[in-house]
Image: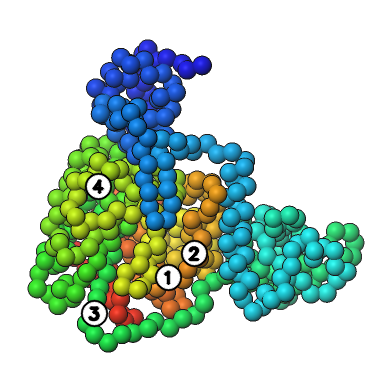
Amino acid sequence: MTQLFQDKEKVIEFFSERGILLSPDAVDRIMSESLGSYVMDLLSEETVASGYISEKDVLGILQKQHTVKTPAYEVDFANVRIKSSVEEFRKYFRNRYEKMKRLITLSVAMRGTTSIRSAKRMLGGEVKIVGMVSDQANTINGNRRLVVEDLDDSITVILMQKNGLTSEIILLDEVVGIVGGLSTKGGDPVIFAREIIRPDIPATSITEYSGEPSYVGSISDIHVGSKTFLKDSFRNMISWIKSGDEAASRLKYLILSGDVVDGIGVYPGQDNDLEILNPYEQYMKLNDYVSEIPRDIHVFIMPGNHDIVRLAEPQPVLPERLRNDFPGNVTFLPNPFNLKLEGKRILLYHGMSLNDMVELIPGLNFDTIGKAVEEILKRRHLAPRYGGKTPLVPGPEDYHVIEEVPDIFITGHVHSHAMGNYRGVRYVNSSTWQNQTDYQKMMNFSPNPSMLTMFDLNSRNYFAKDFK
């Protein structure tokens, strides 16, 4: 039975706990209409309106369902439920396993792959399986024990210290191929691994074309609205784009890969760090900047964890009422997204999982974030470890599997800057446009802000331009 809320303070508290601000008119509308807990639950899950709800939003959500369609997937925000059933998790991990298995079994080393159940029925000899790692631990004699599972069964795999496999960095939930000898001595079958096969990026060479350069520029984590937003540097970049500089004249595309504004309610006490409190006004200020960019440059904007969409990935495009205010040369994308420009595949991902990778991969930190990007490419998955600091929505499809090898891979989020080439894939962890925050000071991390990274779509060239 729907519960009615008759106390304004309880209404405000309900949304505040979920990081959502209500306008006074919205509170009055909720109270006057006696909307009750059912509609309040619907509003809190209506991620298009997350962050700030006006009276118009309340009426609009009651009158219609908001559906956003993208080339990658469709999300019905009025029916999104972050609470997920066991069946949704099962579908999600099944889809992840099946996609990753297809990639792994392309390897010549995995010809003759069998299911775990079939392998366990063998009397011995070499077996080849593909499994998702559900558990791992070190043994008393210095080896490592894995438990891997496929869609029907699971088996123990031993990585021997003597053949160097114990140095392999294997994450829980990672899908790997195992080549090894099956032992049935002493009880349950066990595989003693001789080789670990990952999907990895096949080594490719970059095709170069004759003709003039055609550049795509990449920036991230602009954080418009924050007191630490580097507005002077950002204006310097826009002035350069509008200048007659030779490289600037070849810029055809500009990608803003998330956290384009600072938002509100993202962390406790954030309002003290904001120059612009209203998130919608933050987007309008961003619009002022973007509107200065020449109309012949196509601008792409995707969300991040500070933007007013749901936090859990995959994230939908920004709300329609925000999109409509931007000029016609701006296209809004979900996170993650596969973009194709002039025949080149560009994989865009805001990069929340980089925090997890830094913690999970020994020796990595934010100053060596390029190595974390390469570990993601190596595993062909944008968030190989489920959970952690990366909220993911389970469903019938895992959109974080890197099924097609990109020509360019763009991330952001961690406010570092790193460029590289991994087996023919050019990549960048795009620079921020926000100065060092108090949190970063506490973590003893200094960002490298105000860098525009440029990739030539007609050659292997790429470079960064500093606007500090």
Q: In the image, which is nearer the foreground, mark 4 or mark 1?
A: 4
Give the Cα distance between marks 4 and 1: 27 Å
**Residues at discs 2 and 1 in contact (Cβ within 8 Å):** yes
> What residue is pinned by disc 3?
213
Q: Earlier in the sequence, mark 1 or mark 3?
A: 3
Inspect the image, locate mark 3, and give the three-letter code of the amino acid beneath it.
Pro
Quarter of the figure with the C terminus: bottom left
Inspect the image, locate mark 4, and give the three-letter code of the amino acid beneath it.
Arg
Q: In the image, which is nearer the foreground, mark 3 or mark 4?
A: 4
> What residue is pinned by disc 1?
406
Q: Earlier in the sequence, mark 3 or mark 2?
A: 3
Q: Quadrant of residue 72?
A: bottom left
Q: Residues within 10 Å of mark 1 (few under 14, many from 20)?
A: many
> What residue is pinned by disc 4?
323
Q: Position of residue 396 (x, y in %)?
A: 55, 49
Give the Cα distance between marks 1 and 3: 19 Å
Under circle 3, the secondary element is loop
Under circle 4, the secondary element is helix
Q: Is 15 located above or below residue 10 in the figure?
A: below
Q: Is 290 located above or below residue 241 in the figure?
A: above
Q: Residue furthest right?
A: 186
Residue 375 visible in the shown view: no
- Please state if 397 lies on the left or on the right of 459 as rendered: right
Q: In the image, which is nearer the foreground, mark 4 or mark 2?
A: 4
> What residue is pinned by disc 2?
402
- Please state if 99 lies on the left or on the right of 345 as rendered: right
Q: Residue furthest bottom?
A: 210
Q: Is 155 located above or below residue 34 in the figure?
A: below
